[in-house]
Image: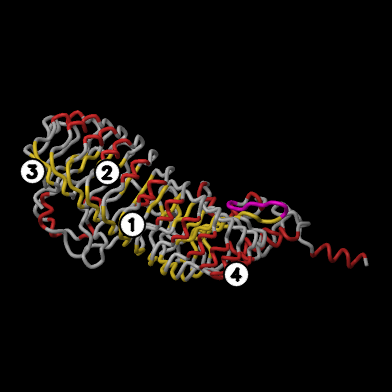
Amino acid sequence: MAAVALTTAACSPDPGREDPTGSPCTSPRVVDQSQETLVADCEALWAIHTSEGLDDVVGLEGFADDPTWMQSSAWAHPNPLDDWYGVGVADGRVTYLSLAGISPGSWPDLLALTELRHLTVDCVSGPISPELGDLHNLEVLSLGSGNIDADGSRSGISGDGLYECPGTMTGPIPPELGNLTNLTNLLLSSDELSGPIPPELGNLTELFVLGLAHSRLSGPIPPELSSLTELYHLNLNNNQLSGPIPPELGNLAQLGVLDLAVNRLSGPIPPELGDLESLRELSLGYNFLSGPILAELGELVALYLLNLNCNNLSGPIPQQLTSLRGLQSLFRHHNQLSGLILPGLGDLPQLIGLYISGNQLSGSIPPELARASKLGTLDLSGNQLSGQIPAEFSGLTDLARLDLKDNRLSGPVPDSLADLANLWLLSLDGNELTEPRPMGLEERPGWWHGTIGDHTSRITWDQWNAYCLRDSEPDQGTGQPTTTSPSTDDQAEPSRAIAPQGTVPDNTRHLHYPAVEQTPGYRYGPSCLWTDL
């Protein structure tokens, strides 16, 4: 018997040595061998890490912050399991995992981690496994096919500071994800993620954040999402969703952010959205919405961003919007709004940006707008405004962009505009003004005046800086804008715009850069001034 015992001991792994097969999980310095379930979790992690189809870069996301992040040894012996990058351990199980990537063949190993509460994978290849719906303890699920942000100077990273995913997450959202009833955060994003939003997601009644943006999801927004009564952030931006906005969304009493921009939604804005008293951001831009801007939106007293850009909205601006005392940014350009600009908009003390270009607004510019003392951008271009430019605008000391082009304004340009020290864009073309610009602006340091040249027809649209394209009228066939337009709001700009074809027309030789200095804190560089078009 003693000889047998000796033989058995001789065949046992040395506690101080790694498994010769390469797995570190048999080392007690990595995992306490008495915790069998944790050893099993370790083996599952190691199988994911060494799976075929993933190169050494696509390991755990956290080691992007370490100088040795390219070394696979950073996720191995002799580091204890709970020190592995992107791994969290609690109560003898792996509960947190943040991966840079996963191959299609690794889903079974991942599903062995049955106590996971947080799972983030930046680079998913292939379809989402329906079996993820069996990880009932998950509270956070984030899957994508985006790029990993990193310092471009590090070894192995491209010069633009991004690591390209080796594959793309494809296919539909599995309805089985509706079984993850403990989820508080669900984030899915991929250019190839398609199909409808499963109504089963309405079962996730603990959800706080639902983000399905920047994908190719289609079909209607399921009214079942109105069951997510704990939801604070709903982001369906930049998809191909169609049909009306479900009025049932007005039941989401806790909702603070509703972003449905850049889709194919149609019909009127449902008045039930006026019941969302906690709403702080409402983005409905770049859709096909029609009808009036509802007076009920004036009941959203917590709102600080309202984006209705590039729809087919019509009628006057409702007086009730002047009750939104916390409003900072108001985007309503490129619609069919008519009537007068409300003087009461000047009584919004937090207003920073007012964008109502490309409409059919008429009458004079109310001097009361100058009471909005924090205003940094005022864009009233492309309307039917008449009368003179209010001299009171000289009191807008934070004003950086004043765009009044393509109206019917007349009379002199107030010389007092030259006192606006922060002004770096002044666009007045297409009016009947008696002076092109006020005295004093011509000599302002940092301003350059001139034309771009006569050979712009040799430049293709792909080569042209999109932020120097004039806001176009909606395409008559689609009703959508044919170019993107500058905006201080990240969510107001579509990342997949309908691109023009061919070459830039010759008449862009009249394009001027009136300013080359960028206002501190403003996201875009010098804007453009069009003449003679």
How far is mark 4 from mark 1, CA to CA? Answer: 33 Å
Q: Which of marks 4 and 3 is in front?
A: 3
Indicate which label's residue lies in the foreground, 2 or 3: 3
Left-right relation of 282 to 4: left
Q: In which quarter of the image is the N terminus?
A: bottom right
* Count of numbered badges drawn on the protein: 4
Give, as a three-letter code, the residue at label 3: Glu
Amino acid identity at mark 2: Gly
Residue placed at 66% from the left, 50% from the top? 82
Is residue 481 toward the left or the right of residue 305 in the image?
A: left
Disc 3: which residue:
432
Q: Which of 479 and 229 is in front in this view?
A: 229
Q: In front: mark 1 or mark 2?
A: 1
Say if 345 sits above or below 166 in the image: above
> Is 437 positioned to the left or the right of 278 in the image?
left
Circle 4: is it few (<14), some (14-19), or many (20+) Cα within 10 Å?
few
Mark 4 / mark 2, whichever is N-terminal: 4
Residue at mark 2: 525
Segment colored magenta: 85-92
Tell me the residue that label 1 is attached to: 494
Indicate whether 351 appears above or below 222. Answer: above
**For marks 4 and 1 on the same chain, the one whose residue lies earlier in the sequence:** 4
Q: What separation in Å lies between label 1 and label 2 (alpha carbons)?
A: 18 Å
Q: Name the residue under label 4.
A: 131
Task: Name the element at disc 2.
Answer: loop
Q: What element carries label 4?
A: helix
Callout 3: 10 Å neighbours few (<14), some, many (20+)? some
Q: Are marks 2 and 3 in contact (CB under 8 Å)?
A: no
The spot of residue 201 in percent (x, y) is 54, 64
